[in-house]
Image: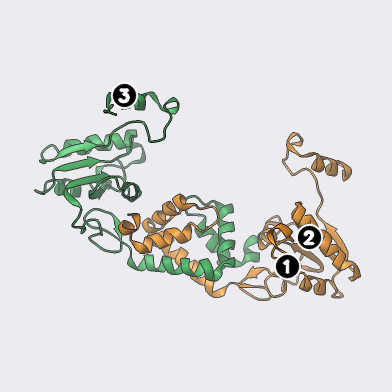
Chain colours: A green, B orange
C-alpha cells in the first residue's frame, strides 16, 4: 500500500537510508520526508556531497586511510614523525585518534581485527603490508592502538609475534581510568591496571 | 584537525548527514564511513536515488501529498471515495494512515497545525484550499485526522468553524485504548473516552 502511495522512487530512497547505521525503517522514513521538504537547503547539497565523495574519495594504498588523495594527507605530511606507525583496526579509530590529537605519527589501518568466530583470519587484514613497513629503516616504533577486547588483544599478540624480527619497539596504549570516569563504575581489570600504572601527580 | 585529515569533502558529507533527523554528529560520522566503505553497494545507489528524487518528486497542488506526479497517485485513483476528505497536519501522517490502510478517501495536507507559541497562524496552513474543496458537490465528509494535542485540537476546532457553511459532515478519529495498549499505563482522559465510546463485543 505504502509503495503505491509514495511511489517507488521515495520507497527506494527510504530503503537505502534505512541501511545507514543509526537509522531504522521508521527514522529512514522521517529522514526521507525531511530531505524532500528541505529540497534546496539539504537534499540538493547532500546529493552533491555524495556525488563528490563518489568521484574523489579513495583508499590510501600505503596506510589504508580514506582520503581524496593517494597517498593520503597524513602519509604525505612532512610534519608527521615517520618513526612511529600507529596500527588501528578501522578508519573510524584513526579519525578518533586524530580528533583527540593523540599522536603525531603515521597510521596503518588493518581493516578489522582477528576474529575466529566471525571467520576473520590474518589474510583478511592488512598485516603483510604492516610487516613490510615495519622493516623500513626509519620506523622505530609500532603502536598497537587496538580495542581492549579479546579480538583486539588477540590481534595485538599476533602482530607482536610477527614483528619480532623487525628492529622496532612494539607498544600499546595505556589502560586506566577514563578522563571524567567514576571509579565506582569501572571494572576490576581497569582499576587494577590503572593502579599498577599509576603516575606522579 | 579532523577536517585536515579526512578532507573537506568528507567533512561536508558528515555535516549534511548530521542534519537528518535521527542522526547526530557521531552517528553521521559512522554513516559517512559506512557509505564510503560500501561505495558500490550503498553510496552509489543512494546518490542515484537522491538525484532521482530531486528530479521527480513534487508536491500535489490538490492535496499537498508528495509524489512523482501532480495531481498525486491518490488524487487520481478512481477507487478512492471522493466524498471523503481526510485532513492531516503532515505528509508523514498521510503515510501512516495509508500504511494502516485506515480509510479509502482523499487527503488534504495542512502542512502544520495552528501554534500561537511557534507563530504558526491560519495563513501558514493550507486552509483556504481545504474550505474550497469542502464546498465541492461530491464531498460529504471531512475527517479531521489531527494529533490529539492542544495544537491539533485547536486546529480542528478552527477548521470546524470555517466549514459550518459547507454541506459536509465534520468528523474526527475516535479516542480509545491503543491496540496492544495496557490500561494501567493510559492517562485518565483516554480511559474515560474509551469507556464513553465503548462498543459491542
Distance, label 3 to label 2, CA atoms, is 63 Å
Q: Secondary structure at mark 3?
A: helix
B30 is higher (above) or lower (below) than B155: above
Residue tagged 1: B125
Residue tagged 3: A195
A102 is higher (above) or lower (below) than B137: above
Q: Are marks 3 and 2 in contact (CB under 8 Å)?
A: no
Comparing A113 with A148, the one in front is: A148
- At horizontal 39% and vertical 54% (from top left) the residue drawn is B33
Comparing B187 with B137, the one in front is: B187
Locate residue A52 relative to residue B117 in the image: left or right: left
Could you say where residue A35 lies in the image, as x and y percent from the top left? 55, 64
Numbered tag placed on residue B155 in the rendering: 2
Q: Chain of mark 2?
A: B
Crowd around label 1: few <14 · some 14–19 · many ≥20 (10 Å): some
Locate residue B102 relative to residue A51 in the image: left or right: right
Question: Which quarter of the rendered picture does the C terminus of chain B lie within?
Answer: top right
Q: Are marks 2 and 1 in contact (CB under 8 Å)?
A: yes
- At horizontal 21% and vertical 37% (from top left) the residue drawn is A171
- At horizontal 90% and vertical 67% (from top left) the residue drawn is B164
Could you say where residue B137 lies in the image, as x and y percent from the top left? 87, 75
Q: Chain of mark 3?
A: A
Residue B53: tell me if it is visible.
no
Distance, label 2 to label 1, CA atoms, is 10 Å
Q: Secondary structure at mark 2?
A: helix
Amino acid at each position: 500500500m505504502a509503495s503505491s502511495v509514495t511511489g517507488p522512487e521515495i520507497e527506494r530512497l527510504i530503503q537505502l537510508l534505512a541501511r545507514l547505521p543509526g537509522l531504522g525503517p521508521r527514522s529512514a522514513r522521517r529522514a526521507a520526508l525531511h530531505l524532500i521538504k528541505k529540497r534546496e537547503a539539504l537534499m540538493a547539497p547532500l546529493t552533491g556531497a555524495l556525488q563528490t565523495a563518489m568521484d574523489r574519495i579513495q583508499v590510501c594504498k600505503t596506510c589504508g586511510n580514506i582520503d581524496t588523495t593517494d597517498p593520503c594527507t597524513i602519509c604525505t605530511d612532512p610534519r608527521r614523525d615517520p618513526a612511529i606507525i600507529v596500527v588501528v583496526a578501522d578508519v573510524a579509530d584513526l579519525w578518533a585518534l586524530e580528533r583527540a590529537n593523540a599522536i603525531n605519527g603515521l597510521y596503518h589501518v588493518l581493516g578489522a581485527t582477528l576474529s575466529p568466530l566471525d571467520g576473520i583470519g590474518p589474510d583478511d587484514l592488512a598485516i603483510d603490508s604492516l610487516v613490510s613497513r615495519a622493516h623500513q629503516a626509519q620506523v622505530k616504533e609500532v603502536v598497537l592502538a587496538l580495542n581492549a577486547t579479546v579480538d583486539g588483544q588477540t590481534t595485538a599478540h599476533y602482530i607482536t609475534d610477527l614483528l619480532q624480527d623487525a628492529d622496532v619497539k612494539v607498544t600499546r596504549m595505556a589502560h586506566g581510568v577514563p578522563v571524567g570516569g567514576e571509579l565506582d563504575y569501572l571494572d576490576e581489570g581497569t582499576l587494577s591496571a590503572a593502579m599498577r600504572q599509576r603516575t606522579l601527580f
